[in-house]
Amino acid sequence: MTWTTHPVFNQPHPLSNSNLFLSDLPLREALLREGAQWDTDWLASVGLQLGSAESLELGRIANASPPELLRYDGRGERIDEVRFHPAWHLLMQGVCASRLHNLSWQPDAPASATVARAARFILHAQVEAGTLCPVTMTHAAIPLLQQALPSAFADWRPGLLSDRYDTHAQPGAEKRGLLIGMGMTEKQGGSDVMTNTTRAEPLERRGPGEVYRLTGHKWFFSVPQSDAHLVLAQAAGGLSCFFMPRLLPDGSRNAIRIERLKDKLGNRANASAEVEFLDASGWLLGEEGEGVRLILKMGGMTRFDCALGSHGLMRRAFSVALYHAHQRHSMGKCLVEQPLMRQVLASQALQLEGQTAFLLRLARAWSQPANEHERLYARLFTPVAKYGICKAGIPFVAEAMEVLGGIGYCEESELPRLYREMPVNSIWEGSGNIMCLDVLRALQRQPGMEAMLQQEFDAVKGSNRLFDACWRKLRSLHSHLQEAQGREVAQTLLLLGIGAQLLQCAEPPLADAWCQQWLGSRQNTGLDEFLSQRLLLRAIGG
């Protein structure tokens, strides 16, 4: 064609070939503050790789080409395999190389390995969030398996701590890398796992490490291609936790039938399944009746990862919007120079500043389980973070779409995929009300919780009158906690947790601006010009 109807101009380039770590000054500062500066070189390297056009395209392709269920092979034999696009496997190689599934549990890991892993997790979430599902479940399962792995699977330990991604359909002992999934919920109960009906009968003897036969179903069987799953089933002693390998030690397939893959709103690169157990083999972990206790210990870790993942998605949506606003002209100025648009973007940058500081502080608490103060901090603020940050992500990405306008609503942009991805972290591992009930339970039943909060918040008492008023409000609520107040209590704790961090470690004008924005009687009050520019500069690494 030798003719054109019009020249194309004022169309911003998409954001690619950036360094996701070096461009995030709040993350770099939090990493240093929480003692994981030793991981800076790795994060800078992987941040460059993940921000490349090639990595971003892998994320797009993996979601555009969701997994397929192959029930039978060419001979007509039942195989129940899940086939993925090669893009998925390349992305999985990356998350395993970053040890998102086991960095915290390496024998030589520094004390702050959990902080470094949190930073790595935030970076990988910005490219493709579905790949995080297999590694977060494996990460949560490893501590339990290190203590209670049945003797028949003792040779799995090197594979669980490997940085290799191995897709071969082989017994775990023969593989270079292993991943663990989970199967908890059933049709009739969902989060109410005590209603589970899947039955477990001992093959010979009862007790820890013994093999049982399981019959029943799972309504959500996360990552069915995993090498093994942790499954809840009813034994004679009550609801119990079982280790269920996909392939048995002799190489034969376990009696797990995949009925279908879920057709999900988002998280489409990842596979979630419905399955039936037909006398499937499972090895008891712990004692009969301990299933809920064991699962809850793992649930805290996966809930923390939900908050990290949502934050990573928010960070990517903001980066895309800010990059667009620096290029797009409207009414004689760049969008980022328009006062109202700059206010919107600066407010988003401020929100991310607070979340970054808070989440890496929470990662530090997770890294010190022997410290009673830190253990209580992690116990309370993990469901708080899961509730508040995962909820905040949905309108946050919608706001970023508005910055781009119509093109932000089209699939050529990353934002529709990020928007579809957002709700899964609010729903998976316990939706909002479940988190708020868990917050109330921690406040009411955990000795020392009030003293922990007092120590945390009194440290900044007097720094900001709005923070002090919010702290008084929480104490008033705490004196007569009721279930109907669960959401208010959880949200108030989130604001206090973030505010305390910023008042301790951020520049005073920034911390005061955050308190005015989020604790004041009128939220979304304007930021002054200097601070707006400062926040947007920090958001691109300056």
Image (cartoon, rainbow, N blue to C red):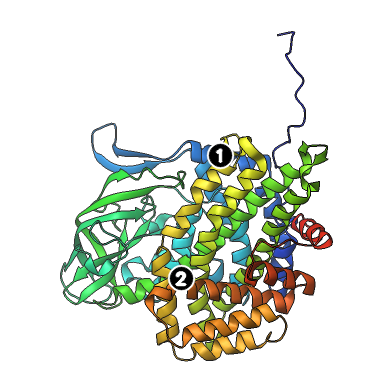
Q: Which residue is mark 2?
A: 487
In this view of the protein, can residue 46 be seen by the observer? yes
Q: Is residue 65 shown left or right of residue 290?
A: right
Q: Position of residue 495 (x, y in %)?
A: 59, 72
Assess disc 2: are there few (<14), some (14-19) or many (≥20) residues with their C-alpha within 10 Å of its C-alpha.
Answer: many
* Mark 2 element type: helix
Q: Position of residue 456 (x, y in %)?
A: 61, 85
Where on the picture, by quarter, is residue 323? Answer: top right
Work out which quarter of the rendered image holds the N terminus and state it.
top right
In this view of the protein, can residue 146 be seen by the observer? no
* Mark 1 element type: helix
Assess disc 1: are there few (<14), some (14-19) or many (≥20) residues with their C-alpha within 10 Å of its C-alpha.
Answer: some
Where on the picture, by quarter, is residue 180? Answer: bottom left
The residue drawn where x is 52% and y is 77% is: 378
The residue drawn where x is 69% and y is 84% is: 460
Work out which quarter of the rendered image holds the C terminus and state it.
bottom right
Mark 1 against mark 2, which lies toward the viewer?
2
**Compared to 24, does 434 lie above or below?**
below
Among numbered discs 1 and 2, the one appearing first in the sequence: 1
How many numbered marks does the figure carry? 2
Q: Which residue is mark 1?
A: 60
Q: Disc 2 marks which amino acid?
A: Arg
